[in-house]
Image (cartoon, rainbow, N blue to C red):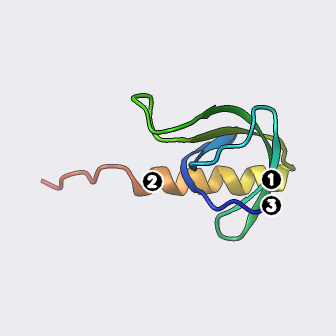
Amino acid sequence: MTVYARIHNLSEGGLFLRTSTPLSLGSKAVVRFGEPGIEATAMVVWSRGAESQGGPAGMGLQFVEVDESRKDLIRRMVERELQGNRPKSKQP
């Protein structure tokens, strides 16, 4: 089964996927994202159904099978995102 979802939080340890159809706790999934295409196996460690005060519907996945080269790609992707989201410093 293929599920398309939006990544809302990515770290070296896992990610949050915003989706109205989260998988069951403990389910494993292969996730593919980024440029170049990063592929990793992850396990659902929590999920949230309908929109609630706690945030949007979706699931938290923890990476469980990621080799070092892919971890490095994820790390660099996170660093690029953080650099792109830093407030611009004002020049005097």
Rendering coords of residue 15 (x, y %): 63, 43
Gap in Å between the C-alphas at discs 1 and 3?
16 Å
* Residue located at (17% from left, 56% from top): 91
Say whether disc 2 or disc 3 marks the residue closer to the N-terminus. 3
Q: Nearer the viewer, mark 2 or mark 3?
A: 3
Location of mark 3 (residue) = 1
Q: Nearer the viewer, mark 1 or mark 3?
A: 3
Rendering coords of residue 32 (x, y %): 73, 61
* Residue located at (50% from left, 38% from top): 50
| Quarter the N terminus occupies | bottom right
Gap in Å between the C-alphas at discs 2 and 3?
34 Å
User: Which amino acid type corresponds to the residue marked 1 in the rendered image?
Assistant: Ala
User: Which amino acid type corresponds to the residue marked 3 in the rendered image?
Assistant: Met
Rendering coords of residue 82 (x, y %): 47, 49
Rendering coords of residue 72 (x, y %): 74, 52
Going by the picture, which residue comes out furthest to the bottom? Answer: 36
Location of mark 2 (residue) = 83
Location of mark 1 (residue) = 40
